[in-house]
Image (cartoon, helix red, strand yellow):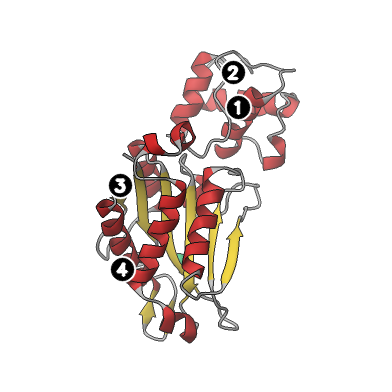
């Protein structure tokens, strides 16, 4: 049975955007609760970060999703901007994820847009270190998307916005990409946002290929390699220095070789 993390953005002291009497945290929660109910009725297992108006932490949310081994993470938000009241729906996904996460983002944005909202498309956003800007996308191992459902400060968007309809549209998008039963659908692909298979051999200076990309992906996610461009599949001096720094921090012998113990430590560090 597929397991989905449905997270409502903000909450408690953190209201998010606030316009025309709408609080973002309340809209996010209403859709989150409706979406959870719909998904469960279709046979999904669903976990939530909150089901009421309480404070939350993105770090804890991400840890819960990782510990629970979810197949996907969907975090709900409302857009707003200070200038013009822009309009429409958009969905963010990981800059490293050309697979399930990207397809999930596309399916969700298309289904919401089908309700009459302007389709602003799917997007990625990176920080100055080249990592995903949004914490929930950066810190989770499963494919994660951040849904900006519509613009809170656009009266037309809010007139069109029906909680149950939007929740149903998002559920349809999820179902298109990740069916309720894993065996009937995405199979091994549902194992997470990590686009490379773990190598079952040691990696050291001079190695090349997808095994090295697997290592570089972890080093990037953990902050030891700066930019996604460094996930190039070539184990050079930079990768070696990053790996040794990780090994020192992890209390492993800093030999610059990604052996079995180091590979396990990389996985543990992100979980
Ligand atoms: Zn928000």
Labels 4 and 3: the sequence-earlier one:
4
Q: Callout 1: helix, strand or loop? A: helix
Whether 267 is drawn above or below 140: the answer is: above
Percent coordinates x, y for residue 199 in the rendering = 57, 19
The answer as to whether callout 4 falls within 8 Å of ligand 1 is: no
Please state if 238 lies on the left or on the right of 13 as rendered: right
Q: Specify the quadrant of the image occupied by residue 185.
A: top left
> Residue at position x 36%, y 54% from top?
6
Disc 1: CA contacts within 10 A as few (<14), some (14-19) or many (>=20)? many
Taking depth in this image into account, of 85 and 251 the one nearest to the observer is 85
Marks 4 and 3: which is nearer the front? 3
Q: Would you say 9 lies left or right of 224 here? A: left
Which residue is under mark 4? 30
Report which quarter residue 31 is drawn in: bottom left
Dividing the image into four equal quarters, which quarter contains ligand 1? bottom left
**In terms of depth relative to the viewer, which is nearer, 34 or 54?**
34
- Secondary structure, mark 3, is loop
Percent position (x, y) of residue 182?
Answer: 38, 37
- Give the residue drawn at x 65%, y 25%: 212
Could you tell which of marks 1 and 4 lies nearer the N-terminus?
A: 4
Q: CA gap, disc 2 to disc 4?
A: 46 Å
Estimate the spatial distance between the alpha carbons at disc 1 and disc 3, rounded to whole Å: 32 Å
| Mark 3 closeness class: few <14, some 14–19, many ≥20 residues within 10 Å | many
Mark closer to the chain start, 3 or 2: 3
On the image, the x and y values in percent for residue 171 come to 38, 57
Of mark 1 and mark 2, the one earlier in the sequence is: 1
């Amino acid at each position: 049975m597929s397991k989905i993390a449905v997270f409502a953005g903000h909450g408690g002291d953190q209201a998010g955007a606030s316009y025309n009497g709408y609080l973002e945290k309340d809209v996010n929660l209403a859709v989150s609760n409706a979406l959870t109910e719909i998904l469960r009725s279709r046979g999904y297992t669903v976990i939530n970060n909150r089901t009421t108006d309480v404070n939350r932490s993105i770090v804890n949310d991400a840890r819960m999703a990782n510990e629970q081994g979810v197949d996907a993470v969907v975090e709900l938000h409302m857009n707003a901007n200070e200038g013009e009241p822009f309009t429409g729906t958009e969905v963010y996904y990981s800059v490293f994820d050309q697979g399930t996460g990207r397809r999930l983002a596309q399916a969700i944005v298309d289904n919401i847009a089908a309700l009459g909202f302007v389709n602003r498309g799917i997007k990625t956003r990176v920080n100055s270190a080249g990592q995903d800007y949004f914490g929930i996308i950066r810190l989770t191992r499963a494919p994660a998307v951040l849904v900006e459902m519509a613009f809170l400060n656009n009266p037309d968007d809010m007139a069109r916005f029906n909680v149950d309809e939007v929740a149903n549209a998002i559920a349809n998008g999820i179902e298109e990409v990740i069916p309720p039963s894993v065996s009937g659908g995405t199979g091994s692909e549902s194992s997470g946002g990590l686009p490379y298979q773990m190598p079952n051999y040691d990696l050291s200076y001079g190695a090349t290929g997808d095994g090295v990309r697997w290592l570089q992906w972890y080093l990037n996610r953990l902050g030891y390699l700066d930019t996604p461009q460094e996930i190039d599949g070539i184990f050079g001096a930079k990768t070696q220095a990053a790996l040794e720094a990780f090994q020192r921090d992890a209390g492993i012998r800093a030999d610059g070789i990604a052996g079995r113990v180091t590979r396990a430590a990389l996985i543990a560090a992100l979980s």
